[in-house]
């Protein structure tokens, strides 16, 4: 039986929203992190990391100027994203370290920008090898870190597909006693 359940698929298809839908049905405190989309005038300008033991699970936040804890951002009129490795290596690591007592860890989401964040990569892999269940989202891209995550024993990856994926996720949570009846 897989101990870790990850969703994958194209951007903006509801992977993180599906996890959010299940949060009210999960027993106990939930640790880990979510990467929040920062929006200005309807356009995504940055993403920030939220520690789920300290902040609510929100997928989108309005961008109101200076924001702490950005993990990636885009300069005005630039098509390129810039990673902020210190956020992964400090706040991301802290969020995963603090989740040790939680019955479930959320990792929403793992992507290509974490490649150079060595401390963050190490704790992600450590948590994936622990007995604690992990529920997460993984980018549908290639790279050494993402490929290593995908090759972790006990990791089940599901492409986002409406009801079928929803049923698999509910079964995953039920089998571990994490689903409130």
Image: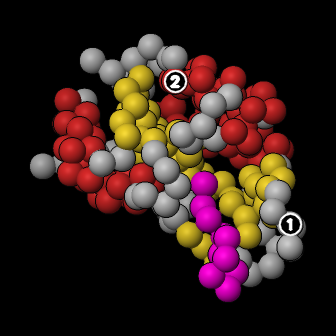
Say whether residue 30 is magenta: no
Q: Which residue is mark 1?
A: 78
Helix, strand or loop for disc 2:
helix
170 is higher (above) or lower (below) than 150? below
152 is higher (above) or lower (below) than 134? above
Q: Looking at this view, is 113 or 101 the one in front?
A: 113
Q: Specify the quadrant of the image occupied by residue 22.
A: bottom left
**Quarter of the picture holding the N terminus:** top left
Q: In the image, residue 75 lies at what x, y percent?
A: 87, 67
**Which span of residues is magenta-colored?**
35-44
Q: In the image, residue 127 lies at what x, y percent?
A: 54, 25
| Badge 1 density bin: few <14, some 14–19, many ≥20, Cα 10 Å | few
Q: Looking at this view, is 91 or 159 the one in front?
A: 159
Residue in the picture at 12% in, 49% down: 181
Rounded to the nearest whole Å, what is the CA distance between mark 1 and mark 2? 31 Å
In the displayed orientation, state which residue is furthest to the top.
153
Left/right of residue 114 with respect to residue 166 in the rendered view? right
Residue in the picture at 33% in, 21% down: 2
Helix, strand or loop for disc 1:
loop
Residue in the picture at 64% in, 41% down: 111
In the displayed orientation, state which residue is furthest to the bottom.
41
Q: Main secondary structure of the magenta part?
A: strand
What label does residue 139 carry, if any? none
Left/right of residue 88 with respect to residue 147 in the rendered view? right
Q: In the image, residue 69 lies at what x, y percent?
A: 75, 57
Left/right of residue 41 with respect to residue 9 in the rendered view? right
150 is higher (above) or lower (below) than 108? above
Q: Which residue is mark 2?
A: 150
């Amino acid at each position: 039986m897989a101990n870790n359940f990850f969703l994958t698929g194209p951007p903006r298809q509801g992977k993180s929203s599906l996890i959010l839908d299940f949060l009210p049905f999960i027993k106990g405190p939930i640790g880990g992190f979510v990467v929040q989309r920062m929006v200005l005038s309807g356009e995504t300008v940055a993403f920030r990391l939220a520690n789920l033991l300290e902040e609510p699970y929100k997928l989108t936040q309005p961008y109101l100027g200076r924001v702490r804890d950005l993990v990636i951002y885009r300069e005005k009129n630039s098509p390129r994203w810039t990673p902020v490795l210190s956020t992964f290596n400090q706040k991301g690591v802290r969020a995963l370290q603090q989740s040790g007592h939680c019955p479930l860890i959320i990792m929403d989401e793992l992507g290509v920008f974490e490649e150079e964040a060595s401390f963050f990569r190490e704790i992600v892999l450590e948590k994936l090898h622990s007995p604690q269940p992990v529920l997460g989202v993984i980018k549908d891209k290639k790279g050494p870190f993402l490929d290593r995550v995908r090759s972790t024993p006990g990791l089940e990856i599901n492409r986002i597909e409406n009801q079928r994926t929803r049923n698999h996720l509910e079964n995953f949570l039920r089998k571990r006693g994490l689903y409130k009846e």
